[in-house]
C-alpha cells in the first residue's frame, strides 16, 4: 500500500467515524466499560476525528514533509493513554500513514473505541493486517521504536525500560488560559468548552487561569452555567464533593457555583472539578509564569499578544499538525528510516 492509498484509507475511516451516533452499540459498550466516556463526549471526539480525516486536510498536514516510502518499515510500539476518547489514535495514524508498522498497547480505559477503529482499518484494507499488531498480554516484543504516553511516574519507567530504543516519551502536562478582562461573552462561552469538555480530563483542558488584578469572575461563572448538568455525572460529582469538603474543613478560601470550585493558587495543575486562578500585575508576570512552567504546559488559551497559542474554545479541537508536547511525531518517525 503506497502513500496515496493510505491517505484514501484514512479518509474513508473519517467517513465511518462521522456515521456513528448515540444509537451505535459501540458507544453504548464503551460507556458501560468506562463511565467517563458518556455518549455526548464520545460523539464529540469521534466526529472531531471524522472531520479531520479527509484527503484535503491530510494533504495539508503532510505535504511539506516530502514523505517517501520506507525501505524497511519499522515496528513502532505505541503505549496509549485513555483519559479521553481515542486520545491515542493520533500516534497510530502517524505510524501507519508514514508506512511503518504499529504494535499497540491500548489503555485499559479505551479498548472499545481503539479496537473498533482497528477493525475498520482492516475491513477497509485487509492488507493492513501485516502493519497492525496488538500487544499480547500487554507485553511489548519485537519492535524498533516506541511512542509512550503516561503519567510523570510512568515516564520514569519508560525512560528506563526503553533506554536502548528510539523513543518519543510524553508525560503529564496541563493547559491554562490567559484572561485580560476584555473577553467577549462568546470568548467566555468558548472557554467553558476548554474547561469542561471530557470533564476536564484531557491535558489540553484548561485547569488554570491567569487573570489581572481586580478581574470580575461573575461573567465567567454565567458563561459556565451551560455545563451545570455535569454535576449529575456520578464520578465527577464524587470529585466535586470530596474537594468541596476538603476546602471547607481546611477553611481554604474558594468560590463555588454548585458544580465547579474556583480557588486562588499558584499551582499549574488543578484537581478534577477545581479550577485554579492566579493574579498577574503585568505582562512580565505572565511571561515569567509561562517560562517557569514551559516544560509542563500543553497549550495556552488566549490572545497571541499576551502569550496565548490557542483561541478560546479550541483547546480540545487540535488539528492534525498540533502535536502533543510540541514534539513532531512525523519527524520522529522519519528519523527512524
Image (cartoon, rainbow, N blue to C red):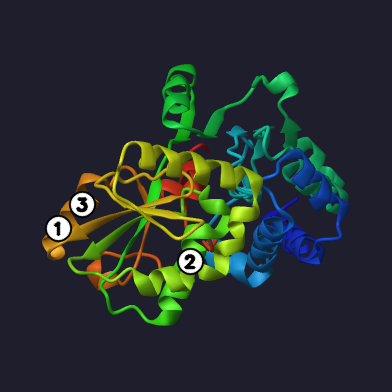
Q: How many marks?
A: 3
Per the model, the C-alpha gap separating discs 3 and 2 is: 23 Å
The image quadrant of residue 20 is bottom right
Mark closer to the chain start, 2 or 1: 2
Secondary structure beneath label 2: helix
Per the model, the C-alpha gap separating discs 2 and 1 is: 24 Å
Residue beneath the point at 43% across and 36% down: 171
Residue 224: % across, % down: 48, 68
User: Dot 2 corresponds to which residue?
Assistant: 192
Residue 239: % across, % down: 52, 42
Mark closer to the chain start, 3 or 2: 2
Residue beneath the point at 70% across and 59% down: 46
The image quadrant of residue 92 is top right
Closer to the camera in the image, 93 or 268: 268
User: Dot 3 corresponds to which residue?
Assistant: 289
Crowd class of label 3 (few under 14; some 14 to 19; many from 20; radius 10 Å)? some
Label 3 close to label 1 by CB (< 8 Å):
yes
User: Dot 1 corresponds to which residue?
Assistant: 285
Residue 111: % across, % down: 73, 38
Amino acid at each position: 500500500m503506497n502513500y496515496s492509498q493510505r491517505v484514501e484509507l484514512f479518509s474513508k475511516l473519517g467517513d465511518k467515524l462521522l456515521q456513528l451516533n448515540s444509537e451505535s452499540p459501540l458507544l453504548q459498550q464503551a460507556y458501560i466499560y468506562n463511565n467517563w466516556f458518556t455518549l455526548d463526549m464520545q460523539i464529540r471526539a469521534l466526529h472531531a476525528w471524522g472531520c479531520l480525516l479527509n484527503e484535503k486536510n491530510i494533504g495539508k498536514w503532510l505535504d511539506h514533509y516530502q514523505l517517501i516510502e520506507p525501505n524497511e518499515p519499522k515496528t513502532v510500539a505505541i503505549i496509549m493513554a485513555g483519559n479521553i476518547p481515542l486520545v491515542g489514535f493520533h500516534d497510530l495514524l502517524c505510524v501507519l500513514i508514514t508506512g511503518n508498522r504499529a504494535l499497540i498497547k491500548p489503555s485499559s480505559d479505551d479498548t472499545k473505541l481503539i479496537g473498533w477503529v482497528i477493525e475498520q482499518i482492516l475491513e477497509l484494507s485487509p492488507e493492513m493486517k501485516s502493519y497492525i499488531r496488538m500487544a499480547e498480554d500487554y507485553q511489548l516484543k519485537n519492535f524498533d521504536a516506541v511512542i509512550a504516553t503516561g503519567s510523570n511516574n510512568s515516564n520514569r519507567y519508560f525512560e528506563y525500560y526503553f533506554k536502548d530504543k528510539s523513543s518519543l516519551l510524553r508525560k503529564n502536562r496541563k493547559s491554562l488560559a490567559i484572561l485580560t478582562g476584555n473577553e467577549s461573552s462568546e470568548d467566555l462561552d468558548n472557554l467553558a468548552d476548554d474547561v469542561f469538555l471530557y470533564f476536564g480530563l484531557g491535558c489540553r483542558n484548561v485547569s488554570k487561569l491567569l487573570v489581572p488584578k481586580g478581574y470580575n469572575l461573575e461573567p465567567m461563572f454565567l458563561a459556565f452555567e451551560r455545563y451545570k448538568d455535569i454535576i449529575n455525572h456520578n464520578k465527577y460529582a464524587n470529585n466535586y464533593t470530596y474537594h468541596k469538603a476538603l476546602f471547607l474543613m481546611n477553611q481554604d478560601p474558594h468560590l463555588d457555583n454548585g458544580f465547579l470550585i474556583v480557588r486562588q493558587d499558584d499551582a499549574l495543575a488543578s484537581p478534577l472539578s477545581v479550577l485554579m486562578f492566579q493574579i498577574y500585575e503585568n505582562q512580565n508576570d505572565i511571561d515569567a509564569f509561562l517560562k517557569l512552567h514551559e516544560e509542563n504546559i500543553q497549550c495556552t488559551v488566549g490572545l497571541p499578544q499576551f502569550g496565548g497559542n490557542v483561541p478560546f474554545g479550541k483547546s480540545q479541537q487540535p488539528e492534525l499538525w498540533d502535536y502533543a508536547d510540541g514534539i513532531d511525531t512525523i519527524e520522529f518517525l522519519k528519523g527512524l528510516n
